[in-house]
Each structure stands twice: as C-alpha cells, then as structure tokens.
Image: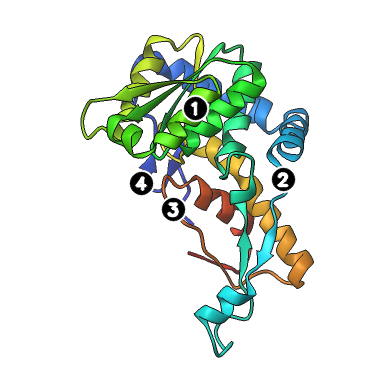
Amino acid sequence: MQELRPGYYGEFGGRFVAETLVPALEELERALETIVRTPAFQAEWRAWLAEYVGRPTPLYRAERLARALDPSGTRIGELLLKREDLCHTGAHKINNALGQVLLAKKLGKTRIIAETGAGQHGVATATACAVLGLPCEVYMGEIDVERQAPNVARMHLLGARVVPVSSGSRTLKDSMNEALRDWVTNVRTTHYCVGSAAGPHPFPALVSELQSVIGSEAREQSLQQSGALPDAVIACVGGGSNAIGTFRGFMNDPVALK
C-alpha cells in the first residue's frame, strides 16, 4: 500500500496559501489532535448535536421507493435513507459548522467567516454563530445571492452579514477566494469555517472528522435495524462533505462506496 504524505490524499491535498495563513493552518492542524479528538470536546459537541441539531437522524426504510426502483424485488432487498434533511437547518452542514465554531471559540477567535453556494452552509454557520455568540460574515457569489434569496433572508434573520461577490463567475469558487482574502487580512481574530471537503490542509481532514458522525450513526443503525451491514452505500456529492462523512463509517467494511 502506498504511504500517504501528511495532508495529502494521493495526488490531491497540500497547502498552497499565502505565508500569512500558514501559522493559522498549523494551529488548526494541532487543534484537530489536541482539541477536536479529545473526549471533552467530543462530549460537548455531541451534546449540541443531540440537544440542538436533533441527532441521531433516522435511518428510514424506503419500501415504496425500493419497489418503484425494483418491482420484481430481485435486485434491491432493502433501501435505507439516512435522513440528514431532518437536522435543524435542513441539512448535514450544521454538524460541521457547530463543530468548527465551537473550536474557534476555544482557540480565542472572535469572528467567523464562511463561503456558501446554495446557501445551506451559510445558514448553518450563521445558526452556529447565533447560538454560540460570535459575529458571522458569509461570502456568496452574486448569481447565488439572486438564485437563493430564501437562504439569504434566513442568514440575515440569524444576524449574519451576507457579502455578495462580484468577481469571476460570481459563484462558489469566487466566494471561497474572497473568504480566503478576508482571512489573510484578519487571521489573528478570525476563523474561516470551510463547509466542503476542500481547501488547504487541514480543512478536508477537519470537515471529514466533523461529518463522520453521519457514517458512524448509519453503520450502527443498519446493524440494529437490519442485523447486517448494507451491500452498498451511496452518497450525493457537491462539495464532498456529505459523501466523506457518510463513507467514513464504512471504509473498513466490505461495503461498496458509490
């Protein structure tokens, strides 16, 4: 087996950023071990997930959908849906946002910034900041601001400032670039709450760690409800946080990941 370099996933990964950000990224890398993975942080974060987010989310047996996809019943024995849509704010994004904002407070940061495309990560970060008492600014491409007006309104209601980005294609890629520019300028006081399994190391590892609650729950629920692991686990992919969070629970099992 090929040994992976720290911060890399095969040919992908690494840290290609302005020198100003290197100390902050190194601090985050240390915090992943010294704070996030400690029993004390895990207990506090999971208490928020249980009492505020509504975890564990159900693993729902979709019998009619299974019949519609496979009327003969020969290919799909059972179809289970992990209902992350039932989380507070309506998606899995809140798992990561709450964890990162909680971590930022422990690191002494006084301001949170985030990027968002469809607006769901922006809503989740604004929600986490509202409940944990930190100011929040969300960078969002102008095109996305127009397309996702309801989520923009929700962010405003939660007290966040939404910053429209007019550069480039005016979508997610450009809002991430603007958030990084902000972070370079305000790195001492600000935490950048990345919402996807993307960005400089250790963000993919941090997001994966905080979203792994999806897969660990799904694995346990599958064993409890069906008495066995699934043959395959299928996840939708946008920025990748849902997929890696789901797959993390099954990586050491003889399960197809798609």
Question: In the image, which disc is placed on residue 11?
Answer: 4
Cα separation between marks 3 and 1: 23 Å
Front: mark 4 or 3: 3
Q: Residue at x 22, y 35 (%)?
A: 169
Question: Marks 4 and 2: which is nearer the front?
Answer: 2
Q: Nearer the viewer, mark 1 or mark 2?
A: 1
Residue at the spot x=32%, y=24% of the render? 164
In the image, residue 76 above or below residue 151: below
In three-dimensional space, the C-alpha distance between marks 3 and 2, rounded to whole angstroms, equals 21 Å
Query: Would you name the residue on which mark 3 appears?
Result: 237
Label pair 1/2, CB-CB below 8 angstroms: no
In the rendered structure, the answer to whether residue 3 lies left or right of residue 19 reads right
Q: Nearer the viewer, residue 109 or 149?
A: 149
For label 2, the residue is 55
Q: Position of residue 214 (x, y in %)?
A: 63, 50
Q: Check whether the beta carbons of the residues at disc 3 and disc 2 lie within 8 A of each other.
A: no
**Could you say which quadrant of the image residue 146 lies in?**
top left
Secondary element at image label 2: loop
Q: Please rate how many residues cluster around mark 2, counting C-alpha atoms within 10 Å: few if below 14, some from 14 to 19, many from 20.
A: many
Q: Position of residue 103 (x, y in %)?
A: 63, 23
User: Which marked residue is nearer to the observer: mark 3 or mark 1?
Assistant: 1
Q: Residues within 10 Å of mark 4 (few under 14, many from 20)?
A: few
Give the labeled residue for mark 1.
155
In the rendered structure, which amino acid carries the disc numbered 2?
Answer: Arg
Q: Earlier in the sequence, mark 3 or mark 1?
A: 1
Three-letter amino acid code at the position of disc 3: Val
Nearest to viewer (mark 4 / mark 1): 1
Mark 1 Cα-neighbour bin, 10 Å: few <14, some 14–19, many ≥20 = many
Residue at the farthest left position:
168
